[in-house]
Amino acid sequence: MKLDPKTDLSFTRSLKAPRPLLWECWTTPEHVMQFFVPKPHKVTRCEIDLRVGGKFNTSFEFDGQEMDNQGVYLEIQNQQKLVFTDAYSEGWKPAPDPFMTAIILFEDAPAGGTTYTAIARHRSTEARKTHEDMGFFDGWGTVVDQLETYALSL
């Protein structure tokens, strides 16, 4: 996959948790609620219909404010790749102001761990910059740290 530095953000980490366990965390609502936003913020609701076109809906609480996100899965490769977007909601209803498409990649790594890549693709250079300025690297980095800690606790 060729990334466009003008519109895409990404990072790769080596995690100690095995790929099947990380996949389970990313595809089970109860697990997503434990890691998906940087603490002390929290996920208050998660709905998953794990199929192309199926919903990936979440609600977050940030500083007392509730934020709803509706999205769908665009691609699913079991234990290898998840692609979801907020450009559509369930039933392929277009969003009025989509923000990004996320791609999460899982590859086996030495010693039973996982090479984890997170990619955020944006529709414009401005949207990418907004996401970076919002703290993409720190925020998504914290989320992956929380994911690893949570997965290893299971």
Image: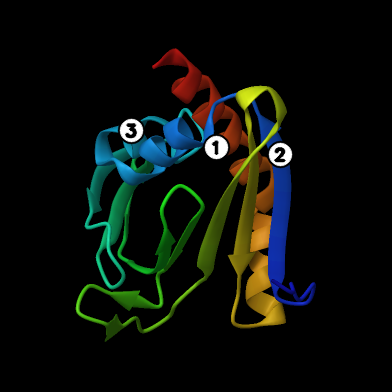
Mark 3 or 1 closer to N-term?
3
Q: Quadrant of residue 53?
A: bottom left
The residue type indicated by label 2 comes to Arg
Inter-mark Cα distance, 2 to 3: 20 Å
Residue designated by label 1: 143
Give the residue at x 65% y 82%: 124
The residue type indicated by label 3 comes to His
Q: Is residue 33 left or right of residue 153?
A: left
Give the residue at x 54% y 54%: 104
Mark 1 or 2 closer to N-term?
2
Give the residue at x 30% y 65%: 70
Q: In which quadrant of the rendered image does the C terminus lie?
A: top left
Residue designated by label 2: 13
Q: Position of residue 58 (x, y in %)?
A: 30, 52
Visible residue check, residue 17: yes
Nearest the viewer among 53 and 96 is 53
